[in-house]
Amino acid sequence: MLIKSFFKDKSTHKYLIILLIVSLVLTTLLILKQYFAKRVNVFYQDALFNFQTNIDLYDDIKKVSNIKELYVSVLGDYNDDIITLLASKNNDDLKNNEIVISKKLFNNVHINDVINIKYHNKDYQFKVKEIVDDSIYPTLAYISYDYLRDIASGEKEFSMYITLDNYLGYSNTKYMLQNLEGFNSSVDRMAYNKKMIIDYEFILAIINIVSFFYYIILVMIIYFVLYCLISNNKDNNYLYKCIGYNKNQIIDINIINILLLFSIVLIFNLFIYYFALIFL
């Protein structure tokens, strides 16, 4: 009954509407942030980051959070063109001397052809398993990890490349890498031969700035609503006292009423947020 009377109060309706509106603005900002973050990650899903380190750190590096794939590489020579041969322990599809090449550079080669690539002035034969249309990194080719270790037998220092689950988390991933014991290298993003039609990163930066200031405004509005709710409940508090409730019970009633009010706002916004994420 006491809760029902609280929610029947016209002032409670007014503050509920205020909270719904201001929280919906925040939810909209969060949805937009998720949307543009996803667009950035889709755009840079193939972006590579490079560093030079000891092969013994391979497994430790792979465990760093946000690393999607880790490649070891060596430089080869194909018809006087420099080819970067990449290999990953996770690439179980490539066996023995199989290779995946770029259509742009190997334009006269077909699947199942055998090609020669020099490494340290020695020829190695590779059987073409797949030809991909990689216009971003046309000089990359992929081989099996075991075969790369065979042709680079005895070497300890390698150029390694990583892709990320979350491109926007690059700075934190870089920090964790550079704090690995024995890791003494800079982590650099390779030139990305691809242009955004819409600058999602700039839009995301603007949303982050707007969100920061809106958080401050939101805290002020919530403080104002709480102050008004508590002030407006003085008459109700007197009524509760007349009915026989003590001071602690009255405080508990007010807390429950306020928590229920904010719960309605929270549930409403969570529904909107997760429903919107389905369509992002």
Image (cartoon, rainbow, N blue to C red):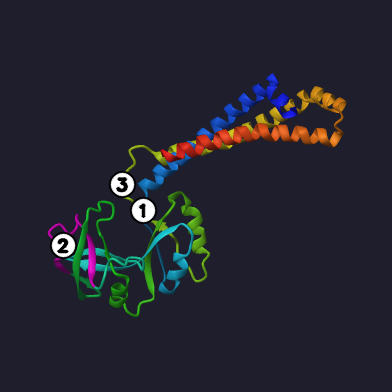
Q: Which residue is mark 1?
A: 47
* Residues at marks 2 and 1, CA–CA distance in whole angstroms: 26 Å
The disc placed on residue 194 is 3
Q: Residues within 10 Å of mark 1 (few under 14, many from 20)?
A: many
Q: Say whether residue 104 is magenta.
A: yes
Magenta extent: 97-115
Q: Which residue is mark 2?
A: 111
Q: Is residue 10 left or right of residue 274?
A: right
Amino acid type, residue under disc 3 in the picture: Lys
In front here: 202 or 134?
134
The relative height of residue 6 versus residue 46 in the rendered view (above or below) is above
The relative height of residue 185 versus residue 221 in the rendered view (above or below) is below
In the rendered structure, which disc, 2 or 3, sits on the residue that comes first in sequence? 2
Name the main secondary structure of what is drawn in magenta: loop
What residue do we see at 35% from left, 77% from top?
Answer: 155
* Residues at marks 2 and 3, CA–CA distance in whole angstroms: 27 Å
Q: Say whether residue 122 is magenta.
A: no
In front here: 272 or 169?
272
Identity of the residue furthest to the front in this view: 1
Q: Are marks 2 and 1 in contact (CB under 8 Å)?
A: no
Q: Position of residue 161 (x, y in %)?
A: 37, 62
Observer-side mark, 2 or 3, equals: 2
What residue do we see at 25% from left, 64% from top?
Answer: 83
